Amino acid sequence: MRYRRLGKTDLMVSEVGFGGEWLERHPKEDSVRLIRYAHEKGVNIIDCWMPDPKSRDIIGEAIAPCRDEWFVQGHIGSTWQNGQYVRTRDMDKVKPAFEDLLRRIGGGYIDLGMIHYVDQESDWDARMNGPFIEYVHRLHEAGVIRHIGLSTHNPIIARKAARAGFIEMILFSVNPAYDLMPPTDNLENYFADSYDDSLAGVDPVRVEMYKLCEQNDVGITCMKPFAGGRLFDAASSPFGVALTPAQCIHYCLTKPAVASVLCGYDTPDQVDAAVAYETCGDAERDYASVLAGAPRHTFGGGECAYCGHCKPCPADIDIAMVNKLYDLAVMQPQVPESVRQHYNSLAHRADECIGCKGCESRCPFGVQVAQRMQKAAELFG
C-alpha cells in the first residue's frame, strides 16, 4: 500500500480507503472482520457518516485494538432520529449525535471532524456563522477533532471550502461520470439512469475546484468512486463501456489534491479487488484509453487529465506534473512561489522539450503537449 499526505493535515493516508456505509447490511461480526481485513492490507482511513448505532459500534470495535493506526472521518450534523438518518443543524440534535459518535468510535477523539453534507450555498452561508460552526471550532480547539473537514457533492461548495482557510480537507464525490456534470445541489441527479448527451468534457467548475484544492493544500478524499457500481456495467455506464475498480481508483488518484479513494465493500474479495490497484500495471490502470475510445465518448476536450499516458518522454520530462504545475500557476496573476519551487525541483523541466510530439500521439484527449511545454517554459523562465 502507498500512502499520500492529506493536504495540510499532514496525515499519511492509504491510497485505497474504506467507505463504511454498507456495514450495517451484514452481521456485526462479519463487518468487524471486514474492516480488520482491510487494515491487514494497509488501509488506514475510514469514513463514518452513518449515524446508526450498529455502524458506529462496528467501526469502534474493529479499530479498537489499533485505534492510533486508523484515521476516522466522523461527521458533525449526521443524526439518528426515530430509527432513521436525519441531517440537521439543530444543535440540540447535533451535539448528542456527535458525542455518541465519539463514544462509540473510541479513543476520545475523531481524526477528521467533517462538517456533514453541505451541498446548497444557502446552507454554506448559514453554517459559516452561528452556533454550528462555533461548535466545530470548539471541538477543534479542544483537540476532540484533530482536523476540520467538510463533505459535499457540489463543486461550488468545495471551491468555497478550499478558499475558507480553516477547512483542511474535503470529502468529495469523484468519478469520471460525475466529473462531466455541471454543479448541482440535487443529489438525485448523480444517480440518474442516464446522462444528458450534450455533456462534453470535465465540467470547468470541477477542474477549477481540483486545482484550488491543490493550490491551497486542501486534501481530498473521494466518495462514490464507482458511481454505486454503475461504472462496472457497460449498460449503465454513461460511456457505454465498463470500467474496472483499478481504473476508477486510478482516475480519482490522478486528480489534483486527491489523497485517498474510499471504496465501499461487502466482502473480502471486494477489498482485494480494490487493493490490487497497488500492484497492478499501467495497462490495468489505464482508464484514459477506455474513455477516449468509448462509443458514447464525452470526455477530454484538450484538457490534461494528468493520466500519464504521455510517457515515456525522450527528454525524461514528467509531462503530467509540468502540466499540473502550469495549470496551478496560471490561476494566479503571478506565479506562486511554492509552485515555482516545485517546478524548479523537477529533474527535467519544460524547456528541455525537443518538440518531437510523440507524447501527443499517445494522449487520449488531444492535448497539445509540445505547445503547453513551450508555454510552461516561458511562464516559469
Image: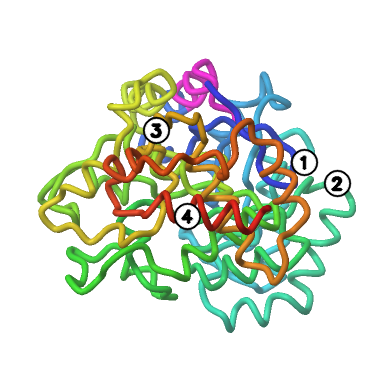
Give the residue drawn at x 39%, y 33%.
311
Q: Is residue 20 visible?
A: no
User: What is the x, y in percent for residue 35?
Assistant: 50, 26
Q: Which residues are magenta?
A: 32-44
Label 3, label 1: how many angstroms apart (C-alpha)? 44 Å
Residue 185, relative to residue 309: is it above or below?
Answer: below
For the residues bearing labels 3 and 1, Cβ distance under 8 angstroms: no
Of the two numbered discs 2 and 3 on the same chain, state the one appearing first in sequence: 2
Q: Is residue 233 visible?
A: yes
For the residues bearing labels 1 and 2, Cβ distance under 8 angstroms: yes
Label 4, label 1: how many angstroms apart (C-alpha)? 46 Å
Mark 4: amino acid: Arg
What is the secondary structure assignment of the residue under circle 4? Answer: helix
Tell me the mark number nearer the camera, choosing from 4 and 1: 4
Label 2, label 3: how many angstroms apart (C-alpha)? 45 Å
The image quarter in which residue 22 lies: top left
For the residues bearing labels 2 and 3, Cβ distance under 8 angstroms: no
Look at the image and say whether residue 232 sits in the magenta stretch: no
For the residues bearing labels 4 and 1, Cβ distance under 8 angstroms: no
What is the secondary structure assignment of the residue under circle 2? Answer: loop
Q: Which mark is residue 372?
A: 4
Tell me the mark number nearer the camera, choosing from 2 and 3: 3
Of the two numbered discs 4 and 3 on the same chain, state the one appearing first in sequence: 3
Of the two numbered discs 2 and 4 on the same chain, state the one appearing first in sequence: 2
Q: Which mark is residue 311?
A: 3
Q: Which mark is residue 143?
A: 2
What is the secondary structure assignment of the residue under circle 1? Answer: loop
In the image, 140 versus 284, the foreground residue is 284
- Compared across the picture, whether 176 is left or right of 335 comes to left
User: What is the x, y in percent for residue 172?
Assistant: 51, 56
